Amino acid sequence: MMDGRVGAVRKTLDLNGYYDTIIMSYSAKYASSFYAPFRNAVCSSPCSGDRKTYQMNPANSNEAIRETKMDIEEGADIVMVKPAMPCLDIIKIIKDEFKMPTAAYQVSGEYSMLKAGIAAGYLTSDSIYESLLSIKRAGADLIITHFTPEFLEGCI
């Protein structure tokens, strides 16, 4: 989310009596090539340039802390880090620093990478569980993943 959006959403919800509506903020959304499969599937790739003007530089962990703090001050109830696996260190830092409910989004590229590795025989399906476990171990209370249906059906 862009700066100030959490506060605007919280204010509007509160003014309309939705005090108990939870806000999950994209507090640390890094620029990443791991978004490519989703962007390609929905034809949402930019016609020119990129999205790096409003997504964080992956080399900058301090910005994640600063942006997360601002979102919490504006009223976020859950903070989120995206993508998950390349940012396990950021998930841990944010969880330790703020002690807030922390979500991690295992994005389409992470999903595709594991599925392709399994299909090619380089990995086994156990790698899916390992990836989710590493995200949980880093501090995520909630994991958003394309593997959810398989996980809930006990296939993982």
Image (spheres, rainbow, N blue to C red):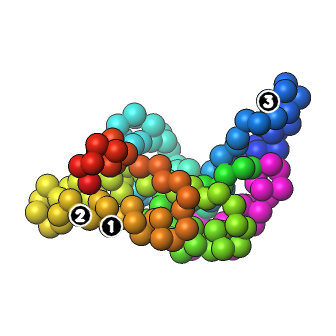
Residue extent of the magenta highlight:
57-75
Q: Which residue is mark 3?
A: 18
The amino acid type of the residue labelled 2 equals Asp
Which element type, helix, strand or loop, lies under badge 3? loop
Which element type, helix, strand or loop, lies under badge 2? helix
Q: Which residue is mark 1?
A: 130
The amino acid type of the residue labelled 3 equals Tyr
Q: Judge left or right: residue 59 versus residue 153.
A: right
- Please state the horizontal and vertical placement of residue 99, each as a whole percent of the image: 70, 67
- Please state the horizontal and vertical placement of residue 67, each as a whole percent of the image: 73, 61
Taking depth in this image into account, of 129 and 60 the one nearest to the observer is 129
Quadrant for the C terminus in the image: bottom left
Quarter residue 148 falls in: top left
The amino acid type of the residue labelled 1 equals Glu
Q: Are marks 2 and 1 in contact (CB under 8 Å)?
A: yes
Looking at the image, the residue that sits furthest to the front is 154
Q: Which residue is mark 2?
A: 126
Q: Judge left or right: residue 48 versus residue 149.
A: right
